[in-house]
Image (cartoon, rainbow, N blue to C red):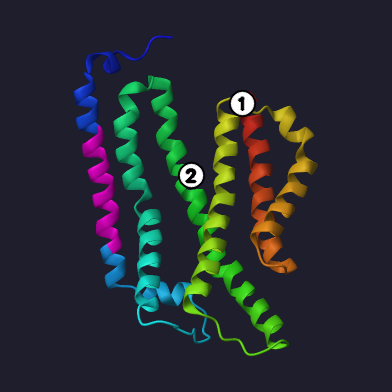
Amino acid sequence: MSPPPEEELLPVSAHIKELRTTVIACLSTIGIIFFILLCFYKPLITLLFPEQTLVILSPIEGFTSMLRVAFWGALLISAPIWGYFCYKFFAPALYTQQRGIIIPFLALSFCCVMIGISIAIFAILPLANEYFLLFNSSLGDNLWSLEKYLDYSLLLILATGVAFELGALLFFAIHQGIIKNETLIHYRRHAIVASFILAALLTPPDVLTQILLAIPLCLFYEIGIIYSKIRIN
């Protein structure tokens, strides 16, 4: 299969120039949102940090922690914009049918990740904090370091977002005919078990937070079965 005609017309120097423009546009977008979040960091603190006072162990720990929160927040919020810039760069090398699926897949991926992050922030993280507060109280005083808490909370949030991204990949594979309806039905029980195992690995060791993550993953799978039936008809 020969490449699209647009790809053959552009010399290497034009590709390099276009790549440089794309990289600058992506970094500029992330940078602008990064500085906006850094200026208005207090709402982020309200979302991520527990009501319990966190211990700051160095003069710059608070500032560096805010830099990390602002960076990851900017990367996620600006994802539709820099994703579109990347799409525009690769679009000339894609066929018309491939172009038609990229934008919907990117939109679905972003929605799935944001749903996962929202569940992590508003449901899983508060329950996990409460669980660890109660568990640790029987062992000693809860004095959580700001940096250590940020490591734990960001890992939990990003892991949940990645887990929900699997739902978008599942729909993409179904749409492309890579996974058939019969295969999905045959491995339904395996998928349910795998969802709970994945939830157990990504969440703290209490049943409620594991269920909160496992149920949406199972729902993604069931919706995938329904969508695969629609595709057949």
Residue at the disc numbered 2: 109
On residue 155, which mark appears? none
Q: Position of residue 133 (x, y in %)?
A: 64, 82
Does residue 233 appear in the picture of this structure?
A: no
Q: Earlier in the sequence, mark 1 or mark 2?
A: 2
CA distance separating discs 1 and 2: 18 Å
Q: Residue furthest bottom?
A: 141
Secondary structure at numbered mark 2:
helix
- Looking at the rendered image, the quarter that the N terminus falls into is top left
Q: Name the kind of residue labelled 1 in the image.
A: Ile
Task: Inspect the magenta stretch and tell me whether residue 65 lies in it.
Answer: no
* 22 or 189, nearer to the observer: 22
Q: Position of residue 61 (x, y in %)?
A: 39, 77
- Residue displayed at 36% across by 61% down: 71
Total residue callouts: 2
Q: Name the kind of residue labelled 2 in the image.
A: Ser
- Residue displayed at 48% across by 72% down: 48
Residue at the disc numbered 1: 178
User: Taking 180 as reference, is 200 above or below it?
Assistant: below
Magenta segment: 19-34
Q: Quadrant of residue 106?
A: top left
- Residue displayed at 35% across by 58% down: 74
Q: Main secondary structure of the magenta part?
A: helix
Q: Position of residue 45 (x, y in %)?
A: 42, 76
